[in-house]
Amino acid sequence: VQLQASGGGLAQAGGSLRLSCEVSGISLDYYAVGWFRQSPGKEREGVSCISWNGGITLYEDFAKGRFTISRDNARNMVYLQMNNLKPEDTAVYYCAAEGSRDSCDLRDEFEYDYWGRGTQVTVSS
């Protein structure tokens, strides 16, 4: 099983980036997917998650109104559109898959079965 996050890079404050998470080795039809991030010196935190069929999406407060999570199960892809970026969004962003056909979990990382390598997002002021 592999999860590959991509799409990070350098953006200016107010700019946008679209992160992608390509999943292989499992069918996303049976997995919720979450995006997490970790800034230097801080613990990893949840950003957003989406249920297996996209029917439920959750966002942390800092992401509400700026970030949008989506998925394409046919392509085994999950996306995180990030708009109006702020310098405090600078972090390594990770995607993770949770075997669930219910909701998704933003608060308990231990619920996630598979993690990918992160992609660096750097936002300049």
Image (cartoon, rainbow, N blue to C red):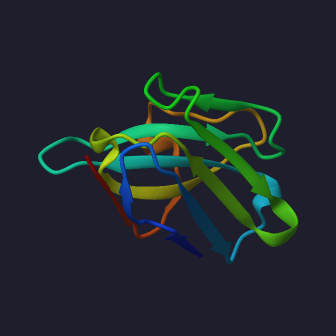
Residue 104 x, y percent position in the rendering: 64, 36
Residue 36 lies left or right of residue 96; in this view the side is left
Residue 111 lies left or right of residue 68; in this view the side is left
Kindly identify the residue that appears in the image at 72 percent across and 70 percent down: 26
Which residue lies most toward the left here?
41
Which residue lies most toward the top here?
61
Q: Is residue 116 above or below residue 42?
A: below
Kindly identify the residue that appears in the image at 59 percent across and 76 percent down: 1
Kindly identify the residue that appears in the image at 11 percent across and 46 percent down: 41
Residue 96 lies left or right of residue 99; in this view the side is left
**Image-quadrant location for residue 13:** top left
Q: Is residue 96 above or below residue 69?
A: below
Which residue lies most toward the right here?
74
| Number of marks | 0
Q: Is residue 26 above or below residue 45?
A: below
Q: Name the foreground residue: 125 vs 68.
A: 125
Residue 125 x, y percent position in the rendering: 25, 46
**Image-quadrant location for residue 94:** bottom left
Kindly identify the residue that appears in the image at 43 percent across and 38 percent down: 46
Q: Name the foreground residue: 17 vs 20.
A: 17
Residue 70 x, y percent position in the rendering: 73, 48
Q: Is residue 25 above or below residue 57?
A: below
Q: Name the foreground residue: 79 vs 112.
A: 79
Residue 97 x, y percent position in the rendering: 59, 55
